[in-house]
Amino acid sequence: MRTASRIRVLHALGGLDRGGIETWLMHVLRHIDRDRFHMDFLVHSVEPGAFDDEVRALGSNVISCLPTGLRRPWSYLTYPRRLLSLLRKHGPYEIIHGHMQEFSAYFLRAGEKAGMKVRIAHSHNGMPPAERQPGTVRRAYRRMLSRLVKRHATHGLACSRVAARSLYGDCWESDGRWDILHYGIDPSPFSERSAVQNQRNRLGIPKGARVVGHVGRFVEQKNHAFLLEVIAECIKQEPGICFLLVGDGPLRPGIQAAVEDRGLAGNVIFTGVRSDVPCLMLSAMDLFVLPSLWEGLGMVLIEAQAAGLPVVASNYVPDEACVVSGQFERLELADGPRCWAEHIVRRLGRQAPDGQEAFEAVMHSSFTLGRSACALQGFYEGTLQQE
Protein backbone atom coordinates (compact mmCIF):
# COMPACT_ATOMS: atom_id res chain seq x y z
CA MET A 1 0.00 0.00 0.00
CA ARG A 2 1.42 3.36 -1.05
CA THR A 3 1.83 6.04 1.62
CA ALA A 4 2.41 9.59 0.40
CA SER A 5 4.74 10.55 3.24
CA ARG A 6 7.15 7.69 2.59
CA ILE A 7 10.22 7.95 0.38
CA ARG A 8 9.89 5.31 -2.33
CA VAL A 9 13.14 3.62 -3.36
CA LEU A 10 13.59 1.09 -6.16
CA HIS A 11 16.65 -1.17 -5.95
CA ALA A 12 17.73 -2.76 -9.24
CA LEU A 13 19.81 -5.94 -9.06
CA GLY A 14 20.22 -9.38 -10.58
CA GLY A 15 18.14 -11.38 -8.11
CA LEU A 16 17.42 -11.95 -4.45
CA ASP A 17 19.51 -15.00 -3.67
CA ARG A 18 22.00 -15.37 -0.80
CA GLY A 19 24.87 -13.27 -2.12
CA GLY A 20 26.79 -10.52 -0.35
CA ILE A 21 24.89 -7.59 -1.88
CA GLU A 22 21.52 -9.27 -1.51
CA THR A 23 22.17 -10.22 2.13
CA TRP A 24 23.19 -6.64 2.95
CA LEU A 25 20.08 -5.21 1.26
CA MET A 26 17.89 -7.63 3.22
CA HIS A 27 19.55 -6.50 6.45
CA VAL A 28 18.82 -2.90 5.46
CA LEU A 29 15.20 -3.69 4.61
CA ARG A 30 14.67 -5.37 7.99
CA HIS A 31 16.14 -2.48 9.96
CA ILE A 32 15.40 0.69 7.99
CA ASP A 33 12.56 2.92 9.18
CA ARG A 34 9.77 1.46 7.03
CA ASP A 35 7.40 4.22 8.15
CA ARG A 36 9.79 6.62 6.45
CA PHE A 37 10.96 4.48 3.51
CA HIS A 38 9.32 2.02 1.15
CA MET A 39 11.79 -0.18 -0.77
CA ASP A 40 10.95 -2.28 -3.84
CA PHE A 41 13.28 -4.60 -5.78
CA LEU A 42 13.59 -4.86 -9.55
CA VAL A 43 15.20 -8.23 -10.32
CA HIS A 44 16.49 -9.71 -13.58
CA SER A 45 15.61 -13.33 -13.11
CA VAL A 46 12.66 -15.54 -13.93
CA GLU A 47 13.57 -17.90 -11.07
CA PRO A 48 12.32 -17.27 -7.49
CA GLY A 49 14.98 -15.84 -5.18
CA ALA A 50 15.79 -17.05 -1.67
CA PHE A 51 14.63 -13.73 -0.15
CA ASP A 52 11.52 -13.14 -2.29
CA ASP A 53 9.00 -14.32 0.29
CA GLU A 54 10.56 -12.33 3.13
CA VAL A 55 10.69 -9.19 0.97
CA ARG A 56 6.96 -9.47 0.28
CA ALA A 57 6.21 -10.26 3.93
CA LEU A 58 7.92 -7.00 4.89
CA GLY A 59 5.59 -5.08 2.57
CA SER A 60 7.91 -4.62 -0.42
CA ASN A 61 7.44 -5.70 -4.02
CA VAL A 62 9.61 -7.95 -6.18
CA ILE A 63 9.32 -6.75 -9.78
CA SER A 64 10.65 -9.16 -12.40
CA CYS A 65 12.21 -7.87 -15.60
CA LEU A 66 13.25 -10.44 -18.19
CA PRO A 67 17.06 -10.37 -18.35
CA THR A 68 19.05 -9.54 -21.43
CA GLY A 69 21.52 -12.04 -22.81
CA LEU A 70 23.98 -12.82 -25.57
CA ARG A 71 21.71 -15.63 -26.74
CA ARG A 72 19.01 -13.01 -27.31
CA PRO A 73 20.97 -10.05 -28.76
CA TRP A 74 17.76 -8.24 -29.69
CA SER A 75 16.93 -8.06 -25.97
CA TYR A 76 19.46 -5.23 -25.57
CA LEU A 77 17.33 -3.18 -27.98
CA THR A 78 13.95 -3.97 -26.39
CA TYR A 79 15.14 -3.87 -22.77
CA PRO A 80 15.17 -0.06 -22.28
CA ARG A 81 11.54 0.22 -23.41
CA ARG A 82 10.42 -2.66 -21.16
CA LEU A 83 12.33 -1.19 -18.24
CA LEU A 84 10.80 2.27 -18.63
CA SER A 85 7.33 0.71 -18.84
CA LEU A 86 7.90 -1.13 -15.54
CA LEU A 87 9.14 2.02 -13.79
CA ARG A 88 6.05 3.93 -14.86
CA LYS A 89 3.73 1.07 -13.97
CA HIS A 90 5.04 0.53 -10.43
CA GLY A 91 6.16 4.10 -9.68
CA PRO A 92 6.42 6.86 -8.98
CA TYR A 93 9.70 6.45 -7.10
CA GLU A 94 11.80 9.27 -5.69
CA ILE A 95 15.01 7.21 -5.84
CA ILE A 96 16.36 4.49 -8.11
CA HIS A 97 19.41 2.65 -6.78
CA GLY A 98 21.32 0.45 -9.25
CA HIS A 99 23.50 -2.43 -7.98
CA MET A 100 24.72 -3.98 -11.25
CA GLN A 101 27.97 -2.12 -11.97
CA GLU A 102 28.08 -0.69 -15.52
CA PHE A 103 24.72 -2.25 -16.35
CA SER A 104 23.14 0.24 -13.93
CA ALA A 105 23.39 2.74 -16.79
CA TYR A 106 20.14 1.32 -18.13
CA PHE A 107 18.30 1.92 -14.84
CA LEU A 108 19.71 5.40 -14.37
CA ARG A 109 18.78 6.47 -17.88
CA ALA A 110 15.26 5.01 -17.57
CA GLY A 111 14.91 6.62 -14.14
CA GLU A 112 15.75 10.00 -15.63
CA LYS A 113 13.11 9.52 -18.33
CA ALA A 114 10.58 8.47 -15.68
CA GLY A 115 11.25 11.69 -13.73
CA MET A 116 13.24 10.29 -10.82
CA LYS A 117 15.26 13.12 -9.32
CA VAL A 118 17.72 10.90 -7.43
CA ARG A 119 19.52 8.22 -9.45
CA ILE A 120 22.21 6.29 -7.56
CA ALA A 121 24.84 4.01 -9.04
CA HIS A 122 26.47 1.60 -6.57
CA SER A 123 29.78 -0.15 -7.25
CA HIS A 124 30.10 -3.44 -5.40
CA ASN A 125 33.04 -4.96 -7.22
CA GLY A 126 36.63 -4.37 -8.16
CA MET A 127 38.15 -4.52 -11.61
CA PRO A 128 39.41 -7.93 -12.82
CA PRO A 129 43.18 -8.02 -13.50
CA ALA A 130 44.24 -7.41 -17.11
CA GLU A 131 44.57 -11.10 -17.95
CA ARG A 132 40.98 -11.69 -16.81
CA GLN A 133 39.44 -8.82 -18.77
CA PRO A 134 36.75 -9.71 -21.34
CA GLY A 135 37.32 -9.49 -25.09
CA THR A 136 37.59 -6.30 -27.11
CA VAL A 137 33.88 -6.00 -27.93
CA ARG A 138 32.82 -6.64 -24.35
CA ARG A 139 35.33 -4.10 -23.02
CA ALA A 140 34.06 -1.47 -25.46
CA TYR A 141 30.48 -2.19 -24.39
CA ARG A 142 31.41 -1.80 -20.71
CA ARG A 143 33.27 1.46 -21.38
CA MET A 144 30.17 2.81 -23.13
CA LEU A 145 27.98 1.84 -20.17
CA SER A 146 30.45 3.42 -17.73
CA ARG A 147 30.18 6.70 -19.60
CA LEU A 148 26.39 6.46 -19.42
CA VAL A 149 26.57 5.82 -15.65
CA LYS A 150 28.54 9.04 -15.21
CA ARG A 151 26.13 10.93 -17.46
CA HIS A 152 22.85 9.82 -15.86
CA ALA A 153 23.77 9.24 -12.18
CA THR A 154 23.05 12.06 -9.77
CA HIS A 155 25.00 10.24 -7.06
CA GLY A 156 27.21 7.18 -6.71
CA LEU A 157 28.28 4.89 -3.89
CA ALA A 158 31.00 2.27 -3.61
CA CYS A 159 31.80 -0.33 -0.96
CA SER A 160 35.53 0.49 -1.06
CA ARG A 161 38.06 2.71 -2.78
CA VAL A 162 38.91 -0.14 -5.15
CA ALA A 163 35.23 -0.47 -6.09
CA ALA A 164 34.96 3.30 -6.60
CA ARG A 165 37.88 3.29 -9.05
CA SER A 166 36.39 0.31 -10.85
CA LEU A 167 33.17 2.13 -11.84
CA TYR A 168 33.91 5.85 -11.53
CA GLY A 169 37.53 5.95 -12.69
CA ASP A 170 40.90 6.78 -11.15
CA CYS A 171 39.89 10.41 -10.50
CA TRP A 172 36.65 9.53 -8.72
CA GLU A 173 37.52 11.60 -5.64
CA SER A 174 37.49 14.80 -7.68
CA ASP A 175 33.78 14.37 -8.49
CA GLY A 176 31.56 15.26 -5.53
CA ARG A 177 28.86 12.84 -6.67
CA TRP A 178 30.81 9.75 -5.65
CA ASP A 179 31.25 8.51 -2.07
CA ILE A 180 32.12 5.41 -0.01
CA LEU A 181 29.50 3.58 2.03
CA HIS A 182 30.60 0.42 3.86
CA TYR A 183 28.37 -2.60 4.12
CA GLY A 184 27.15 -3.61 7.54
CA ILE A 185 26.81 -7.11 8.97
CA ASP A 186 24.34 -8.17 11.62
CA PRO A 187 26.67 -8.79 14.60
CA SER A 188 24.11 -10.58 16.79
CA PRO A 189 24.75 -14.14 15.42
CA PHE A 190 28.46 -13.75 16.28
CA SER A 191 27.93 -12.83 19.93
CA GLU A 192 27.76 -16.43 21.20
CA ARG A 193 29.54 -19.64 20.21
CA SER A 194 27.59 -22.79 19.40
CA ALA A 195 28.44 -26.28 20.58
CA VAL A 196 31.47 -26.95 18.40
CA GLN A 197 31.59 -30.72 18.30
CA ASN A 198 27.87 -31.18 17.66
CA GLN A 199 28.01 -28.92 14.62
CA ARG A 200 31.13 -30.65 13.32
CA ASN A 201 29.53 -34.06 13.81
CA ARG A 202 26.54 -33.01 11.71
CA LEU A 203 28.91 -31.97 8.91
CA GLY A 204 30.89 -35.21 9.11
CA ILE A 205 34.13 -33.53 10.24
CA PRO A 206 36.45 -35.98 12.03
CA LYS A 207 37.02 -35.29 15.70
CA GLY A 208 40.12 -33.17 16.31
CA ALA A 209 40.52 -32.13 12.66
CA ARG A 210 41.54 -28.58 11.89
CA VAL A 211 39.12 -26.95 9.48
CA VAL A 212 39.73 -24.28 6.85
CA GLY A 213 36.56 -22.59 5.64
CA HIS A 214 35.62 -20.77 2.46
CA VAL A 215 32.30 -19.08 1.65
CA GLY A 216 31.64 -17.90 -1.88
CA ARG A 217 29.78 -18.47 -5.09
CA PHE A 218 31.49 -20.94 -7.42
CA VAL A 219 32.43 -18.45 -10.15
CA GLU A 220 35.73 -17.39 -11.70
CA GLN A 221 36.14 -14.39 -9.38
CA LYS A 222 36.41 -16.56 -6.26
CA ASN A 223 39.29 -18.56 -7.77
CA HIS A 224 38.29 -22.06 -6.69
CA ALA A 225 40.75 -23.57 -9.19
CA PHE A 226 43.63 -21.99 -7.24
CA LEU A 227 41.98 -22.98 -3.95
CA LEU A 228 41.91 -26.59 -5.14
CA GLU A 229 45.70 -26.49 -5.58
CA VAL A 230 46.06 -24.96 -2.11
CA ILE A 231 43.92 -27.76 -0.68
CA ALA A 232 46.14 -30.41 -2.30
CA GLU A 233 49.29 -28.76 -0.90
CA CYS A 234 47.78 -28.42 2.58
CA ILE A 235 46.87 -32.11 2.65
CA LYS A 236 50.47 -32.99 1.73
CA GLN A 237 51.69 -31.00 4.71
CA GLU A 238 48.92 -32.02 7.11
CA PRO A 239 46.94 -35.10 5.95
CA GLY A 240 44.18 -34.68 8.54
CA ILE A 241 43.22 -31.13 7.57
CA CYS A 242 39.64 -30.50 6.37
CA PHE A 243 38.20 -27.88 4.04
CA LEU A 244 34.62 -26.68 4.35
CA LEU A 245 33.39 -25.07 1.11
CA VAL A 246 30.11 -23.19 1.46
CA GLY A 247 28.20 -21.97 -1.59
CA ASP A 248 27.03 -22.97 -5.03
CA GLY A 249 27.40 -21.80 -8.61
CA PRO A 250 28.12 -22.89 -12.16
CA LEU A 251 31.70 -24.02 -11.47
CA ARG A 252 30.86 -26.22 -8.50
CA PRO A 253 30.32 -29.49 -10.44
CA GLY A 254 33.73 -29.18 -12.10
CA ILE A 255 35.51 -28.39 -8.82
CA GLN A 256 33.71 -31.22 -7.05
CA ALA A 257 34.66 -33.65 -9.83
CA ALA A 258 38.30 -32.52 -9.64
CA VAL A 259 38.32 -33.10 -5.89
CA GLU A 260 37.06 -36.66 -6.47
CA ASP A 261 39.51 -37.34 -9.31
CA ARG A 262 42.49 -36.22 -7.24
CA GLY A 263 41.53 -38.32 -4.23
CA LEU A 264 40.85 -35.32 -1.98
CA ALA A 265 37.18 -36.02 -1.25
CA GLY A 266 37.91 -37.31 2.25
CA ASN A 267 39.26 -33.88 3.21
CA VAL A 268 36.74 -31.61 1.46
CA ILE A 269 33.10 -31.00 2.38
CA PHE A 270 30.75 -29.15 0.02
CA THR A 271 27.78 -27.77 1.94
CA GLY A 272 25.95 -25.91 -0.83
CA VAL A 273 24.21 -22.65 0.01
CA ARG A 274 23.61 -22.23 3.75
CA SER A 275 21.58 -19.72 5.73
CA ASP A 276 23.63 -20.36 8.92
CA VAL A 277 27.06 -19.11 7.81
CA PRO A 278 27.76 -17.30 11.13
CA CYS A 279 27.10 -20.56 12.99
CA LEU A 280 29.44 -22.46 10.68
CA MET A 281 32.17 -19.87 11.15
CA LEU A 282 31.83 -19.91 14.92
CA SER A 283 31.46 -23.62 15.47
CA ALA A 284 33.08 -25.47 12.58
CA MET A 285 35.96 -23.39 11.16
CA ASP A 286 39.44 -22.71 12.52
CA LEU A 287 40.62 -20.43 9.70
CA PHE A 288 39.05 -18.65 6.73
CA VAL A 289 40.59 -18.42 3.26
CA LEU A 290 39.63 -16.23 0.30
CA PRO A 291 41.96 -16.37 -2.76
CA SER A 292 39.79 -14.10 -4.94
CA LEU A 293 40.99 -12.77 -8.28
CA TRP A 294 39.21 -9.47 -7.58
CA GLU A 295 36.89 -8.11 -4.90
CA GLY A 296 34.95 -4.94 -4.21
CA LEU A 297 35.19 -5.59 -0.48
CA GLY A 298 34.40 -9.17 0.50
CA MET A 299 31.74 -8.84 3.20
CA VAL A 300 32.28 -12.47 4.15
CA LEU A 301 35.72 -11.40 5.43
CA ILE A 302 34.08 -9.02 7.91
CA GLU A 303 31.92 -11.90 9.12
CA ALA A 304 34.95 -14.17 9.46
CA GLN A 305 36.72 -11.58 11.59
CA ALA A 306 33.60 -11.08 13.73
CA ALA A 307 33.67 -14.84 14.33
CA GLY A 308 37.28 -14.54 15.56
CA LEU A 309 38.77 -16.53 12.68
CA PRO A 310 42.27 -15.96 11.33
CA VAL A 311 41.96 -14.87 7.70
CA VAL A 312 44.24 -15.59 4.75
CA ALA A 313 43.15 -13.60 1.70
CA SER A 314 44.56 -12.62 -1.67
CA ASN A 315 46.26 -9.32 -2.34
CA TYR A 316 43.25 -8.34 -4.49
CA VAL A 317 41.12 -7.89 -1.37
CA PRO A 318 40.75 -4.15 -0.57
CA ASP A 319 42.55 -2.67 2.43
CA GLU A 320 39.23 -1.74 4.06
CA ALA A 321 38.37 -5.43 4.58
CA CYS A 322 41.06 -5.70 7.26
CA VAL A 323 39.36 -4.76 10.54
CA VAL A 324 41.33 -6.93 12.99
CA SER A 325 44.91 -6.59 11.77
CA GLY A 326 46.33 -9.25 14.08
CA GLN A 327 44.28 -12.00 12.49
CA PHE A 328 44.32 -10.84 8.84
CA GLU A 329 47.00 -11.85 6.32
CA ARG A 330 47.10 -11.03 2.61
CA LEU A 331 49.20 -13.08 0.19
CA GLU A 332 50.14 -12.65 -3.45
CA LEU A 333 48.49 -15.20 -5.72
CA ALA A 334 51.80 -15.25 -7.59
CA ASP A 335 53.40 -16.80 -4.49
CA GLY A 336 51.73 -20.05 -5.51
CA PRO A 337 49.69 -22.78 -3.76
CA ARG A 338 52.62 -24.23 -1.80
CA CYS A 339 53.37 -20.88 -0.16
CA TRP A 340 49.70 -20.40 0.66
CA ALA A 341 49.53 -23.87 2.17
CA GLU A 342 52.60 -23.20 4.34
CA HIS A 343 51.04 -20.00 5.67
CA ILE A 344 47.71 -21.73 6.37
CA VAL A 345 49.23 -24.71 8.17
CA ARG A 346 51.58 -22.46 10.15
CA ARG A 347 48.72 -20.14 11.13
CA LEU A 348 46.60 -23.09 12.27
CA GLY A 349 49.45 -24.13 14.54
CA ARG A 350 49.34 -20.87 16.47
CA GLN A 351 47.10 -20.04 19.36
CA ALA A 352 43.61 -19.06 18.26
CA PRO A 353 42.86 -15.31 18.32
CA ASP A 354 40.78 -13.82 21.12
CA GLY A 355 37.31 -14.20 19.64
CA GLN A 356 35.68 -11.67 21.96
CA GLU A 357 38.33 -9.05 21.22
CA ALA A 358 37.87 -9.56 17.46
CA PHE A 359 34.10 -9.32 17.82
CA GLU A 360 34.42 -6.05 19.73
CA ALA A 361 36.72 -4.63 17.04
CA VAL A 362 34.11 -5.32 14.36
CA MET A 363 31.36 -3.94 16.62
CA HIS A 364 33.22 -0.63 16.87
CA SER A 365 33.94 -0.46 13.11
CA SER A 366 31.86 1.06 10.30
CA PHE A 367 30.80 -2.43 9.24
CA THR A 368 27.89 -2.97 11.61
CA LEU A 369 24.37 -3.09 10.27
CA GLY A 370 23.14 -0.30 12.53
CA ARG A 371 25.76 2.14 11.26
CA SER A 372 25.37 1.00 7.66
CA ALA A 373 21.56 1.25 7.58
CA CYS A 374 21.69 4.60 9.35
CA ALA A 375 24.28 5.89 6.87
CA LEU A 376 22.22 4.76 3.87
CA GLN A 377 19.05 6.27 5.30
CA GLY A 378 20.85 9.55 5.94
CA PHE A 379 22.32 9.43 2.44
CA TYR A 380 18.87 9.04 0.89
CA GLU A 381 17.45 11.93 2.91
CA GLY A 382 20.45 14.10 2.09
CA THR A 383 20.17 13.50 -1.66
CA LEU A 384 16.51 14.51 -1.67
CA GLN A 385 17.24 17.66 0.30
CA GLN A 386 19.72 18.66 -2.42
CA GLU A 387 16.99 18.54 -5.08
Image (cartoon, rainbow, N blue to C red):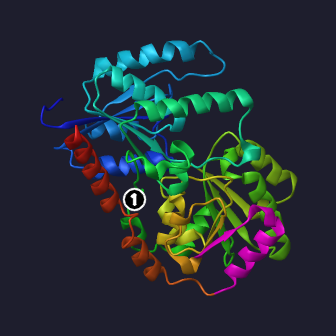
| Residue 303 place in picture, x, y as percent | 49, 64
Give whichever of 11, 94 is nearer the camera.
94
| Residue 323 place in picture, x, y as percent | 49, 71
- Give the number of marks: 1
- The secondary structure making up most of the magenta span is helix
As for residue 94 lying within the magenta part, the answer is no
Q: Is residue 380 above or below residue 269?
A: above
Give whichever of 142, 313 is nearer the camera.
142
Residue 37 visible: no
Which part of the image, by quadrant, shows the C terminus? top left
Stretch in magenta: 328-350
The structure residue drawn at horizontal position 55% and vertical position 83%, both measured from the top left corner, is 353
Query: Seen from this angle, which residue lies furthest bottom?
Result: 351
Q: Secondary structure at mark 1?
A: loop
The structure residue drawn at horizontal position 71% and vertical position 40%, both measured from the top left corner, is 133
Q: Is residue 277 above or below residue 200?
A: above
Badge 1: residue crowd in 10 Å (few <14, some 14–19, many ≥20): many
| Residue 68 place in picture, x, y as percent | 56, 22
The structure residue drawn at horizontal position 70% and vertical position 49%, both measured from the top left corner, is 129
Residue 150 visible: yes
Give whichever of 200, 48 is nearer the camera.
48
Q: Is residue 77 above or below residue 110?
A: above
Please give the residue where the numbered disc 1 appears in the rendered image.
Answer: 184
The answer to whether residue 152 is left or right of residue 4 is: right
Three-letter residue code for mark 1: Gly
